[in-house]
Each structure stands twice: as structure tokens, then as C-alpha cells.
Image (cartoon, rainbow, N blue to C red):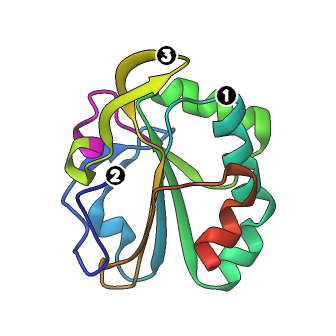
Amino acid sequence: MSHLKVGDKIPQFSTIDQNENTVTQDNLKGKKSVLYFYPKDDTPTCTNQACNLRDNYNHLLSEGYAVYGISPDKAKKHQKFIAKYDLPFDLLVDTEHEIADAFGVWGEKTTFGKTYMGIRRTTFVFDENGVITDVIDKVTAKDHTNQIMG
């Protein structure tokens, strides 16, 4: 679970997107934004989540949201994921999980009895001033847009 909560300001960060353009917390200000942390490109649950957001992207845009995904994958892997599934939003790079640490979503996970460190799938919704209006830490990948619009 994230240590950030509703009412907190977006932490400062700087990274690159799939095209190696610099993206900072300032890119998320001035409009409502969705920043979703996911473990890995082109895996079943991550693909379901990205495709749900893709399929509802125009609705999110019509409600004034910008959407960004972020994972530890590199820019070239993000490019392939975007191309394969025709994703209309930017994917951000966090190979050293510094941003995930700042948001409190990097931590111990257990899958199939194996414990390891990784991204805890979490979505943050921000208002135009960069203030968190929602934290979704129990993501339903195939219905994620409804959770965001909730």
C-alpha cells in the first residue's frame, strides 16, 4: 500500500517516456491526471489493464484526464508494448524504481509462494494542481477505467 494519500501533492520526479522525452511532475499539473504503476510490459494482467485504459481512453480524455503508465521497463520495451497493443498514452521509465519508491509502491510481493521486491500495482489520480484525489491500490485490470471514474 502506498504511503501517499488523498490530499497529498505529487512527489517530484524526472524520467523519460517511451520516446526518451523528459517527463516531470510538472507535466501532470494543469489538467487532471492518472498515473498508474504496473509491474511489467506485455504480461497478462498488465496488458489487460493497459488495454482497458486504451479502450476507454476517449472517455477519460472527455472527462479531462491525461493518462501515464509507469514501470521498471526500458523505453524500447515500452515502445514495443505500445505498438503491439496500440496504446494511445505515454509509458514512463522507472528502471531504478526511484519514482516507485517516492510514491511508496515498490516493496515486497509474494506470487506463487515466492517473495521478491517489485511494483505493487497502484493508480494515483490527481487534480489540476497536482493534488491526489484518489489512490487505487486494489486494481481490477479489466475494469480499471470504472475504478478511476468511480
Q: Quadrant of residue 43?
A: top right
Q: Which residue is mark 3?
A: 113
Q: Which residue is mark 2?
A: 1
Magenta stretch contains residue 56:
no
Q: Residues within 10 Å of mark 1 (few under 14, many from 20)?
A: some
Image marks 1 and 3: residues in contact by CB distance under 8 Å: no
Q: Residues within 10 Å of mark 2 (few under 14, many from 20)?
A: some
Rounded to the nearest angstrom, the CA distance separating label 1 from label 3 is: 22 Å
Q: Residue at x 22, y 38 (%)?
A: 98
Rounded to the nearest angstrom, the CA distance separating label 3 from label 2 is: 19 Å
Q: Residue at x 27, y 45 (%)?
A: 99
Left or right: 27 as drawn, with respect to 46: left
Q: Does 22 sit above or below residue 42?
A: below
Task: Say which label, 1 or 3, has the lower sequence index.
Answer: 1
Q: Does 17 sit above or below residue 7?
A: above
- Secondary structure at badge 3 equals loop
Q: Which residue is mark 1?
A: 42
Quarter that holds the C terminus: bottom right
Give x and y (percent) for residue 104. 25, 49
Left or right: 105 as drawn, with respect to 14: right
Give x and y (percent) for residue 88. 69, 54
Task: Say which label, 1 or 2, has the lower sequence index.
Answer: 2
Decide which of 6, 138 is in the foreground and name it: 138
Left or right: 140 as drawn, with respect to 77: right
Q: Is residue 136 visible?
A: yes
Region of the chain picked out in magenta, as a range: 92-100
Mark 3 or mark 2: which is in front?
A: 3
